[in-house]
Amino acid sequence: MPAPQTPVDSPFGYRSTAREVVEGVDLAGKTIVVTGGYSGIGTETVRALAGAGARVIVGARRPDQAHDVLDGMDGDITILPLDLSDPASIDGFAEAVAGATDAIDILVNNAAIMASPLARDARGYEMQFATNHLGHFQLTARLWPLLVAKSGARVVALSSIGHRLHGLDLDDPNFEKRDYDKWLAYGQAKSANALFALQLDTLGEAKGVRAFAVHPGGIATPLQRHLTMEEQKAMGWYDEEGNVHEAFKSTEEGAATSVWCATSPLLEGKGGVYCEDCDIAVAADPENPRAGGYWPHIRDEELAEMLWAKSEEMTGIAFPG
């Protein structure tokens, strides 16, 4: 069953970096898959994990750009094409991974889009939900035999403080009946990521697979590509001179919680939790909405089950076994 949302007295915190988190951890012999591991915090996630000795397989929607970023980086890094909005691409990536390894120790579902204009995939599904949630749902299902091949695998799902925008509507996930709002769509997708980790952990624990949801923090990365500078200034992310807010993390700091969830011995025997700042998060204070913490809906086990069933329906895919 999911672990309680109780901090574990981690020695790391808000300003810890990914490489600090993994210092002294030996990942030799481990195989790790990271989606979107060539941009923003994904790059630093790969750098830290490969630097600790892991073999890292990166799923990239733009393989040429991934090679530009990752070629020459220390470690054993393989780049394979992956478009999370395209079911055929997901299956092709999973087949290629299965041809390259007989087991996966860690899967980091890192790739995402944020606050994009209304777009739909070939199935007619809203693109943020399709890419951020359904794509990773299908990918994890396809990689499931490799994750359960040996006990102790972990799945890290990148959520966000954006889950507080909620927006999750299982009767209308594709904004066919309601007006499209790019932030509600993002909140829906990020809520789904956290609920996915909750249910995956429930189903995977007996097979030795634990799952974790991560809020990486506020970071200036290409994730904001769909936002104008005026929008970001209005939200307080940048000042009038274009300087990023002092509370924002660097990409190295933003990758730290993903790497901590992937590797920390403090999480042995735990799972299904929402983490931030390299620890298990506590409940949010509604009176202080800019502070950290989680909102109750992403801890709703019944809602997680319902989302799982909806995801199977929408993708036509059920997890093996």
Image (spheres, helix red, strand yellow):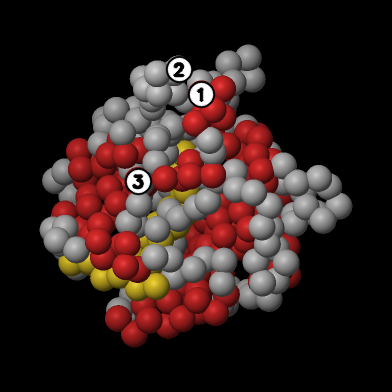
Element class at badge 1: helix
- Residue at image mark 2: 240
Q: Provide residue 167's location: percent of width, then percent of height.
A: 72, 42
- Residue at image mark 1: 233
Q: Label 1 vs label 3: CA separation?
A: 22 Å
Res 275 quadrant in image? top left
Q: Label 1 vs label 2: CA separation?
A: 7 Å
Q: Residues within 10 Å of mark 3 (few under 14, many from 20)?
A: many
Q: Provide residue 187's location: percent of width, then percent of height.
A: 63, 41
Question: Which residue appears at 54% of the width and 44% of the height?
Answer: 226
Task: Name the side, left or right, on which 285 lies relative to 79.
Answer: right
- Amino acid type, callout 2: Glu
- Residue at image mark 3: 41
- Amino acid type, callout 3: Ile
Q: Provide residue 197's location: percent of width, then percent of height.
A: 54, 53
In the displayed structure, would residue 273 be above or below residue 64? above
Query: Residue pushed farthest top?
Result: 287
Q: Residues within 10 Å of mark 1 (few under 14, many from 20)?
A: some
Q: Provide residue 71's location: percent of width, then percent of height.
A: 19, 63
Q: Residues within 10 Å of mark 2 (few under 14, many from 20)?
A: few
